[in-house]
C-alpha cells in the first residue's frame, strides 16, 4: 500500500504545495502522522519553552487524488485510525477557554489496550480512547491556511466525529485536491476547551473518491448514525448560523424536504454542537440522524 512517513509534512494548506504522493480514486493509502507538537514532548519534564514552534501542527501530505478537478466534491473515507505512540497533553496559562489555568504542565499518558491512563491528585483514571483526526483537509483555492486554522477547506476542525469509519466530504479547489491530515487525538471532548486533546502520533488508512453531489454543503461528515455539517467562523454566532443554514440546505436540497419539514425535523431531532472553541476560528457542527431520513426513503448521498 502507498504511504507517507511522518516526516513528509506540510504546515499550511496551500494550492502551491507539491504532492508527495499520488493515488487513484478508491485506492487505500496510509499517512503516518506526528502529534500536534511534532512529537517533541517525551516526558512530563519537557515543557513548551523547549518547543521548536516551527514544527507545530504538522500535516502529513499532501496527497494528490487522480482525476479530482476544482469544484468536485471529494469523499474521504477513514478506513482505519491506529494510535502509534503515547499521548501528550499540556496546560498553557492564558490559552484555551479555561480562565483558571495558571500553571504550565506537561503530561505524557499511556494509551495501551484502548484505555487512556491519567492520574489526578484524587486518584488514577482509565478512560476508553476514541481516536479522531483534528486536522484534515484539502488545499484552498488561494493563499495559505496554517494547519492550526479551520475553514471551508477543512483544516483544524477538531471534530470528534472524524474517526475510523467516518467519511468527510470537502470541495476540491485545485487539481488533485491536495489532501493531508494530522493532529490525531486518542481522546477529546467536544469543545477542546484546554486547546489540546490526548495528542498522539497515528497511522491513518484512507481512500478518496469524487461523488457527484456538487451542491453538498461542505465540510460535511457522515458516520454510521448521522450526517453533520461543519462550519468555522471568527465568532461562534457566525459559525452556528452557518452550520444550521448548511444542514437546512442539505435537507431541502439533496434530501428534498420542504422548508417546514426540514425546520421541524431539525428542531426535533437535530443537535447543534461545538467542535472546538480554541482555534483562530470557532468550529460548530449540526448533526442529523440518518435513521430519520431512512424512514423517508433517503438512501444516501449519491455516488
Ligand atoms: Ca487541533
Ligand atoms: Zn490536537
Image (cartoon, rainbow, N blue to C red):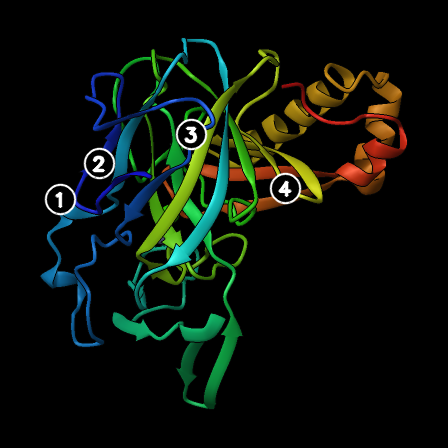
Q: 162 or 22, which lies in front?
A: 22
Lower sequence index among marks 4 and 2: 2
Lower sequence index among marks 3 and 2: 2
- Expressed as whole percent of the image width and height from the top left, the position of residue 196 reads 37, 57
Asked if the residue at tag 2 contacts the one at tag 3, i.e. Cβ–Cβ closer than 8 Å, the answer is no
Name the side, left or right, on which 44 lies relative to 87.
left
Name the side, left or right, on which 270 lies relative to 71.
right
Mark 3 lies on residue? 27
Lower sequence index among marks 1 and 2: 2
1 vs 3, front mark: 3
Q: Residues within 10 Å of mark 4 (few under 14, many from 20)?
A: some
Residue 215 showing in the rendered view: yes
Mark 4 lies on residue? 223
Q: How far is disc 3 from disc 4 in space, using C-alphas?
A: 20 Å
Q: How far is disc 3 from disc 2 in space, using C-alphas?
A: 25 Å
Mark 4 CB near ligand 1 (8 Å cut): no
Q: 64 or 186, which lies in front?
A: 64
Mark 2 lies on residue? 11
Asked if the residue at tag 2 contacts the one at tag 1, i.e. Cβ–Cβ closer than 8 Å, the answer is yes
Mark 1 lies on residue? 54
Lower sequence index among marks 3 and 4: 3
Amino acid at each position: 500500500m502507498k504511504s507517507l512517513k511522518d516526516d513528509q509534512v506540510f504546515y499550511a494548506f496551500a494550492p502551491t504545495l507539491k504532492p508527495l504522493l499520488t493515488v487513484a480514486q478508491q485506492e487505500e493509502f496510509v499517512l503516518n502522522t506526528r502529534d500536534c507538537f511534532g512529537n517533541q514532548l517525551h516526558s512530563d519534564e519537557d515543557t513548551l519553552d523547549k518547543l521548536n514552534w516551527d514544527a507545530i501542527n504538522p500535516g502529513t501530505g499532501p496527497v494528490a487524488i487522480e482525476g479530482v478537478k476544482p469544484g468536485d466534491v471529494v469523499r474521504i473515507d477513514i478506513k482505519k485510525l491506529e494510535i502509534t505512540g503515547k499521548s501528550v497533553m499540556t496546560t498553557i496559562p492564558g490559552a484555551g477557554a479555561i480562565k483558571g489555568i495558571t500553571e504550565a504542565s506537561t503530561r505524557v499518558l499511556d494509551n495501551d489496550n484502548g484505555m487512556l491512563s491519567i492520574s489526578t491528585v484524587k486518584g488514577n483514571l482509565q478512560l476508553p480512547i476514541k481516536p479522531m483526526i483534528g486536522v484534515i483537509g484539502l488545499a484552498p483555492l488561494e493563499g495559505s491556511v496554517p494547519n492550526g486554522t479551520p475553514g471551508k477547506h477543512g483544516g483544524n476542525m477538531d471534530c470528534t466525529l472524524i474517526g475510523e469509519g467516518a467519511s468527510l466530504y470537502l470541495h476540491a479547489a485545485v487539481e488533485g485536491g491536495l489532501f493531508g491530515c494530522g493532529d490525531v487525538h486518542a481522546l477529546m471532548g467536544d469543545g477542546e476547551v484546554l486547546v489540546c486533546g490526548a495528542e498522539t502520533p497515528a497511522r491513518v488508512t484512507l481512500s478518496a473518491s469524487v461523488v457527484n453531489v456538487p451542491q453538498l454543503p461542505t465540510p460535511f461528515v457522515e458516520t454510521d448514525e448521522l450526517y453533520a455539517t461543519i462550519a468555522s467562523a471568527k465568532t461562534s454566532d457566525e459559525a452556528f448560523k452557518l452550520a444550521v443554514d448548511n444542514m437546512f440546505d442539505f435537507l431541502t436540497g439533496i434530501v428534498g424536504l420542504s422548508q417546514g419539514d426540514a425546520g421541524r425535523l431539525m428542531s426535533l431531532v437535530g443537535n447543534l454542537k461545538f467542535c472546538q472553541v480554541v482555534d483562530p476560528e470557532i468550529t460548530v457542527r449540526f448533526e442529523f440522524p440518518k435513521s430519520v431520513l431512512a424512514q423517508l426513503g433517503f438512501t444516501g448521498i449519491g455516488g
